[in-house]
Amino acid sequence: MKILKYKKFTGLHIVCKKCNKLIEVSQETYKGCNHPIDRQKYKAILKQNGGRKTRDLKSVEYDEAIRELLDFKHELANPIRLIAEIPKVEVKHELLKDCIMMFGDWLENVDVPNHQKRPRSSSHIKNTLSNLMKFSRFLEDNKFDLNRFKIYDLNDVIIGKYYDHLDLTCKMATTYNHNTKSLKSFNNFLINQKGFNIPNFFGKVKLKYESMNPTSIKDDYFKKLLNAISNEDSICIYPNGRRKNEYRPYTRDAIELVAYTGMRIEETMSLKFSDIVLDDDGNIQHLVGTDLKFERAHNWNNTKAPKKVLIPISAELENVLNRLDYKKYMGTDKYLIADDFNISRKTLATQLSHSFTFFRKKANLSDDFSIKHLRKTFLTKLHTKTGFIESLGYQRSAKVTLNNYIDKVQVVKEINKIGFGYFNE
């Protein structure tokens, strides 16, 4: 039987692909293989790390087979080349509804290369896609068939009509802007990520001005709310009949901690006893918090040092820490709030927000403030009483703080207390 040309070379073999026997020198040695030469293949068999690596070579010419063998050997010495995935053949979706589904996968990092992945919260993804589905429903209501409507069918007339619709249905500028940002993101994805040759229609849409008017919580309102927090009459009955006890042993401490640190709710719930810093005399100097919102937006891949916030100590904050027995747990990795409970910090923050709303209603207070206003209250007090708000890192810039967190009415009241005059008389 004729066989492929063979000359001994380390790692090179000839194998019959019909009976899977080696037939390098003669047929007789390998027990009766008599299959024709077109069934034979050069094969590389190399030892590596105590095992064998094999590959069928493409060439039927000896010299070319040797080159393939050496290339295979080189690949084994460079393992990154071996694990490179074969790129998938991407289907070019054109229907608007398919493009929205593709965008949803991208937001969730489905089939996105690891170095391009971005962590996004489930609420962000849900709200973004909800805004896109609102646009789809608008098209359906105007007799467009979504089973035929392609992304190339978009035009300025359709988009202009949609924004006339948003002007009528969006009561707040923030709602209008959230819808617009979702559509802008979708349009940019199709152009920049998927290479669609379409105009950037939504890039031309201007966001509405959002008039910021931060308000803080009055001192007597906050004290009244704290006094209402107890295990008595703490059952909330939801519209569906479900009953839930909104009181927890840590509820009051947690709400006070949010108020006296000025951190966002989840950030406050993430504080640990190891975040307490003492001065040379052993007294509490400050706490060190982490700006989670900044981290998720600008340091999602952990390539930078975390953005820390230095939380000044106040008499009220020190009282809470004393109640939490900080001296006993000083320096430990225990959370200040609910460390012994099997609950995530994010879930704890949501639970606390619900409890705050319940006890605010129980205290017969108006519904024009929520737990988020505690941060505005703290920063307003810090600004009016010390003037050092820019130095501690609560926000990325002073402009963001002044526009979004400072209660201007309270600033005026503090100025009046000082006794402002043109000539200081």
Image (cartoon, grey):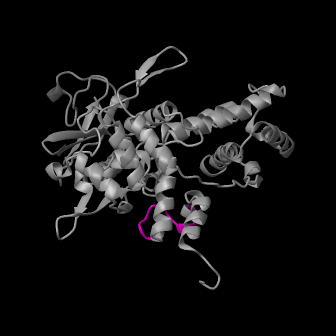
**In front of the other: 46 or 269:** 269
The N terminus, quarter of image: top left
* Outermost residue to the left: 50
State left or right for residue 368 relative to residue 223.
right
Q: Residue at x 61, y 35 (%)?
A: 129
Residue 211 in view of the camera: yes
- The image shows residue 103, relative to residue 147, as above or below, that is below
Magenta: main secondary structure equals: loop
Residues shaded magenta: 391-400
**Residue 164 on image: x %, y %:** 84, 41
Q: Is residue 392 magenta?
A: yes
**Residue 67 on image: x %, y %:** 33, 52
**In front of the other: 106 or 197:** 106
**In front of the other: 24 or 109:** 109
**Residue 91 on image: x %, y %:** 60, 35
State left or right for residue 291 relative to residue 133.
left
**In front of the other: 91 or 188:** 188
Q: Residue at x 46, y 67 (%)?
A: 385
State left or right for residue 116 relative to residue 7.
right
**Residue 119 on image: x %, y %:** 45, 45
**Which corner quadrant of the image does residue 419 belong to?**
bottom right
Residue 120 in view of the camera: no
* Outermost residue to the top: 241
* Outermost residue to the right: 157
* Outermost residue to the front: 425
Q: Residue at x 84, y 46 (%)?
A: 156
**Which corner quadrant of the image does residue 415 belong to?**
bottom right
